[in-house]
């Protein structure tokens, strides 16, 4: 591996800021071009597509030998050792409703190992970054996961899959089991941002099932570099993970299955 990760991170942060500017310019406008994808609950806007096209162009220009996996456009030479995993607009439902929790997520892996992650929430102007082995940061300031050990004192985040109407394995049972045992639950509507909130200690822990690589690639690294753990808890519902400190994750396993 001969990539300078520090300079690469600086480049990616610049891309994220440009994408964020695009997202802000269309936010709460009347011309979002909303379409459905897998079902009526799963939407995409023209802003998703514009942002992904922008990122693909930048990646291909700067790293032409690298592969890319994007939420909207799919796979591009994913057999390269270097693979960029991109969600151009995580939180599309929020965005299309005029709710301010949305972000761009950009991760880079090498032979399957995460090297760097960038998540930028432009409306909140929060830039989360991590390089493997170098810690995690929010707007340049080091962050750490929550040190809480008791579920009763903890606020957790979660989400629900798009097939929740037809698949009874839709996270509702997990929520029913754990809700009486925690201080509170938050459904922010963006897995990448949820993970960053865990990394910063704004959420004490998080779980979700039915996720995809572009939802979690950058955020997982940011959590780990902030001293947290990522633990898989299912194998038959896409990517299913818990995130937080080891104490809370261990206790969550009794209820989240």
Image: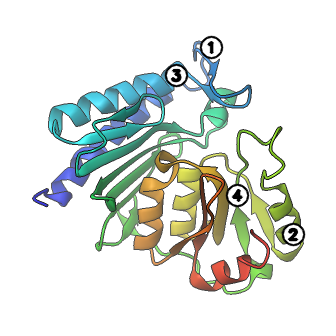
- For the question of whether residue 125 can be seen, the reply is no
Can you identify the residue that label 2 sits on? 177
Distance from label 2 to label 4 (Cα)? 13 Å
| First of labels 2, 4 by sequence position | 4
| Image coords of residue 221 (percent x, y) | 41, 64
- In the picture, measured across the screen, residue 214 lies left or right of residue 10, that is right
Which label number is shown at residue 22?
none
Q: Secondary structure at mark 3?
A: helix
Q: Nearer the viewer, residue 45 or 83?
A: 83
Q: Look at the picture and state if 52 lies above or below 33.
A: below
**Residue mark closest to the camera, 1 vs 4:** 4
Q: Position of residue 90 (x, y in %)?
A: 54, 41
The answer to which of marks 2 and 1 sits earlier in the sequence is: 1
**Residue 217 relative to residue 109: left or right:** right
Mark 3–mark 4 Cα distance, whole angstroms, equals 27 Å
Q: Nearer the viewer, mark 3 or mark 4?
A: 4
Q: Could you tell me which secondary element the residue under label 2 belongs to?
A: helix
Q: Is residue 219 left or right of residue 134?
A: right
Q: Which residue is mark 3?
A: 26
- Tag in front: 2 or 3: 2
Q: CA distance from mark 1 to mark 4?
A: 30 Å
Which label belongs to residue 158? 4
Instruction: Indicate the secondary structure of the residue bearing disc 1.
Output: loop
User: Which comes sooner in the sequence, label 1 or label 4?
Assistant: 1
Q: Quadrant of the N terminus?
A: bottom left
* Quarter of the figure with residue 206: bottom right
Spatial CA distance of label 2 from label 3 is 40 Å
Task: Look at the numbered discs 2 and 1 and tell me whether their residues touch, using CB distance below 8 Å.
Answer: no
Residues under numbered marks 3 and 4 in contact, where contact means CB atoms less than 8 Å apart = no
x 71%, y 27%: residue: 39
Q: Which residue is mark 1?
A: 30
Task: Measure the alpha-carbon separation of dots 2 and 1.
Answer: 40 Å
């Amino acid at each position: 591996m001969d990539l300078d990760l520090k300079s690469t991170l600086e480049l990616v942060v610049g891309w994220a800021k440009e994408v964020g500017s695009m997202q802000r310019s269309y936010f709460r406008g009347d011309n979002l071009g909303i379409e459905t994808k897998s079902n009526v609950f799963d939407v995409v806007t023209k802003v998703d597509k514009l942002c992904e096209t922008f990122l693909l162009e930048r990646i291909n220009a700067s790293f032409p030998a690298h592969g890319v996996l994007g939420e909207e456009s799919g796979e591009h030479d994913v057999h390269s050792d270097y693979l960029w995993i991109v969600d151009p607009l995580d939180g599309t439902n929020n965005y299309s409703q005029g709710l301010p929790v949305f972000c761009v997520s950009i991760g880079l892996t090498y032979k399957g190992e995460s090297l760097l992650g960038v998540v930028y929430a432009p409306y909140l102007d929060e830039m989360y970054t991590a390089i493997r082995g170098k810690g995690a940061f929010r707007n340049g300031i080091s962050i750490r996961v929550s040190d809480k050990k008791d579920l009763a004192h903890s606020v957790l985040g979660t989400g629900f899959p798009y097939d929740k109407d037809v698949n009874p394995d839709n996270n509702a049972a997990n929520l029913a089991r754990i809700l009486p045992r925690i201080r509170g639950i938050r459904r922010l509507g963006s897995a990448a941002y949820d993970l960053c909130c865990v990394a910063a200690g704004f959420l004490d822990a998080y779980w979700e099932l039915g996720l995809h690589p572009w939802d979690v690639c950058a955020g997982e690294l940011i959590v780990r570099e902030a001293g947290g753990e990522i633990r898989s808890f299912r194998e038959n519902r896409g990517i299913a993970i818990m995130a937080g400190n080891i104490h809370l994750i261990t206790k969550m396993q009794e209820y989240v299955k």
